Amino acid sequence: IHVHHNRRILNALIKMYGVCGDLSTATQLFVGMHHKDNVSVNSVMDVCVNRDECETALQIYEQYSDLHDGVTHMLALKACTELR
């Protein structure tokens, strides 16, 4: 199995690194993904919001506007409320 081509595994790794506090690796995995989906966007946005990187989360929200769903919008609203 090629991890770099398996979106489900990459999405899980993004969440795992985020939970472990490694935002850098989580975002590097996201940036390196060839085929992102709304789960990918939601995963990295959630990591950013939970690590007080709300501006980064909103930048991702704007950049990947074609991959939004209800969760994405909720994460964007959460990021807005937590901006400092």
Image (spheres, grey):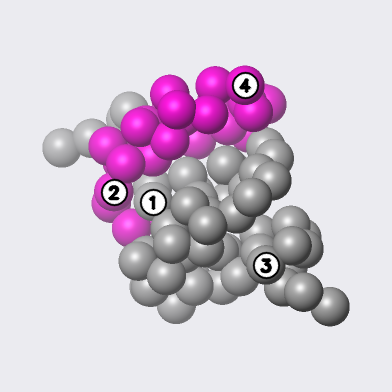
Can you tell which quarter of the image residue 54 is in?
A: top left
CA gap, disc 2 to disc 1?
Answer: 5 Å
CA gap, disc 1 to disc 3?
Answer: 21 Å
Q: Amino acid at mark 4?
A: Asp
> Can you tell which mark lies on residue 53?
2
Q: Nearer the viewer, mark 4 or mark 3?
A: 3
Compare marks 4 and 1 and give the one earlier in the sequence. Answer: 1
Which residue ends up furthest to the left in the rendered image?
84
Q: Is residue 53 visible?
A: yes
- Kindly indicate whether the residue at mark 1 contacts the one at mark 2 (C-beta within 8 angstroms): yes
> Can you tell which mark lies on residue 4?
3
Compare marks 2 and 3 and give the one earlier in the sequence. Answer: 3
Rendered location of residue 9, percent (x, y): 73, 68
Compare marks 4 and 3 and give the one earlier in the sequence. Answer: 3
Q: Indicate the secondary structure of the residue bearing disc 3.
A: helix
Rendered location of residue 17, percent (x, y): 49, 73
> Can you tell which mark lies on residue 28?
none
CA gap, disc 2 to disc 3?
Answer: 25 Å
Residue 58 belongs to magenta span: yes
Q: Amino acid at mark 1?
A: Cys
Q: Amino acid at mark 2?
A: Glu
Compare marks 4 and 2 and give the one earlier in the sequence. Answer: 2
Q: On the image, numbered disc 4 is attached to which residue?
A: 66
Of 18 and 80, nearer the camera is 18
> Can you tell which mark lies on residue 48?
1
Residue found 27% across the figure and 37% down from its top = 55
